Image (cartoon, helix red, strand yellow):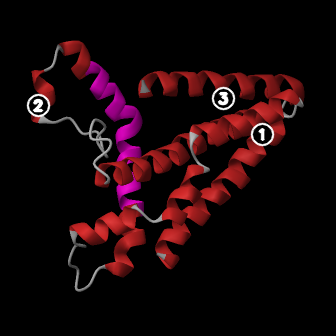
């Protein structure tokens, strides 16, 4: 599913970049489209990371892993599943590791003497209602809504700028909220 999402995202941003390049004859449009693809991928990974952690601590959603590394039990699957998981790792593994690093950086103020947080503290960390509401703006729903509005009004260039500055601004607010407020 995630690999399919990535293929669609790549096709979408290649199409946006190509249309804008044809209209404006500017390499900048292709660069903006590539940055848009990177931005949406990272923001959605951030949203999924915190949503999955929250749902794990609520004992509601144990199917998905917080990070998707290849594990011993995965090697018991068929070859096609292993190939898909390796592709997933190539596309999203580095993003998972980045989200863990961002999370640890945000959480660092709460640790005492380099001791990890207790299970209860972690549950509280991942259950912060305001942090979850803020990161909810980074899910695919908001991303696609902004794209739809800009598409309806034929402002794809505006979409790329909103993607680059507004949506990444929301992401930065989410990160800083976790770092400073919680």
In the rendered view, tell whether residue 141 sits above or below residue 76: below
Front one among 153 and 130: 130
Mark number, residue 159: 1
Which residue in the protein does label 2 denote? 73
Which residue in the protein does label 3 denote? 13
Front one among 43 and 98: 43
Tell me if label 2 and label 3 are in contact, CB under 8 Å.
Answer: no
Res. 159 in view:
yes
In the rendered view, tell whether residue 7 sits above or below residue 124: above
Q: Which segment did they paint magenta?
A: 83-102
Tell me if label 2 and label 1 are in contact, CB under 8 Å.
Answer: no
Structural distance between the alpha carbons of marks 2 and 1: 42 Å
Rate crowding at label 1 as few (under 14), some (14 to 19) or many (20 or more) other CA atoms within 10 Å.
many
Q: Position of residue 106 (x, y in %)?
A: 42, 70
Q: Secondary structure at mark 3?
A: helix
Q: Secondary structure at mark 1?
A: helix
On screen, residue 94 versus residue 9, left or right, reads left
């Amino acid at each position: 599913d995630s690999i399919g999402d990535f293929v669609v995202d790549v096709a979408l941003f290649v199409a946006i970049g190509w249309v804008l390049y044809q209209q404006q004859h500017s390499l900048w449009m292709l660069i903006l489209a590539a940055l848009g693809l990177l931005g949406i991928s990272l923001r959605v990974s951030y949203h999924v990371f915190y949503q999955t952690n929250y749902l794990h601590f609520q004992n509601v959603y144990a199917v998905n892993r917080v990070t998707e590394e290849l594990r011993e039990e995965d090697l018991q699957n068929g070859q096609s599943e292993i190939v898909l998981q390796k592709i997933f790792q190539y596309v999203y593994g580095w993003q998972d590791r980045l989200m863990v690093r961002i999370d640890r950086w945000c959480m660092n103020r709460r640790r005492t003497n380099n001791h990890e947080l207790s299970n209860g503290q972690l549950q509280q960390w991942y259950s912060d209602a305001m942090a979850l509401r803020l990161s909810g703006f980074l899910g695919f729903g908001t991303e696609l809504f902004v794209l739809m509005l800009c598409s309806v009004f034929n402002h794809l260039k505006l979409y790329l700028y909103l993607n680059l500055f507004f949506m990444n601004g929301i992401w930065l607010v989410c990160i800083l909220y976790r770092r400073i407020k919680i």
